[in-house]
Amino acid sequence: MDYSKKYSEKLISAKEAAAKIKSGDHVELGWAAGISKAVDKELAKRVDELDDVIIYSGLAFAEPEVLKADPEGKHFVWNSWHAGGFERKTINAGPSAFYIPLRYSELPKYYRDEVDLDVAVVMTTPMDKHGYFNFGLCTSHQMAALEKAKTIIVEVNE
């Protein structure tokens, strides 16, 4: 089966993808090297039109644009499963970020049993000839997040 036609019909810009996130949504933005840069950037531009967006992520390698855009946490709240350096500083400074203590191995179960997830953003490799994507470095809890999310946004990273 040729998936390329269906795939091309679903392609949207990062701006259009970020526009799918609404006030009050709970959003998985990715993990470590798999954190969406394009959707994060576009979501940050919408800071003044959104409220109470709860973001789940962790081990970010750089400060996300949503936190730069809203350092007081009036619009976006960052929840980290595993806090890296800048995340620890942001969590300690409050009120825009929080640490959720749990064992990393429990993360898939936590998503399946505890998190009401509206949007999951996942970074993948390009689709292969069989219609599959590869989560690459971030396989730990991505499937659980995708199972729970009402909307899935796939950011393809060449």
Image: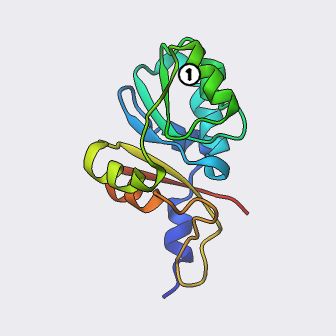
Apparent side of residue 16 relative to residue 26 in the rendered image (left or right): right
Up the image or down, 10 lies above or below 14; here it is below
Apparent side of residue 125 relative to residue 3 in the rendered image (left or right): right
Q: Identify residue type, mark 1.
A: Ile
Q: Quadrant of residue 26?
A: top left
Which percent across, then down, holds residue 37? Answer: 67, 42
Which percent across, then down, holds residue 139? Answer: 53, 63
Seen at 59% across and 35% down, the residue is 83
- Report if residue 7 is visible in the image: yes
Which percent across, then down, holds residue 109? Answer: 33, 55
Seen at 38% across and 58% down, the residue is 144
Up the image or down, 84 lies above or below 52; here it is below
In the displayed image of the protein, which residue is found farthest to the left?
113
- Report if residue 149 is visible in the image: no
Secondary structure of residue under mark 1: helix
Position of the C terminus by quadrant: bottom right
In the displayed image of the protein, which residue is found farthest to the front?
103
Could you say which is closer to the camera, residue 132 or residue 108?
A: 108
Task: Classify 10 Å Cα crowding around label 1: few (below 14), some (14-19), many (20 and above).
Answer: some
Which percent across, then down, holds residue 29? Answer: 53, 43
Could you say which is closer to the camera, residue 158 or residue 78?
A: 78
Which residue was labeled with disc 1?
Answer: 91
Could you say which is closer to the camera, residue 129 or residue 81?
A: 81
Q: How is the image coloured?
A: rainbow
Seen at 62% across and 26% down, the residue is 88
Up the image or down, 91 lies above or below 144; here it is above
Seen at 56% across and 41% down, the residue is 58
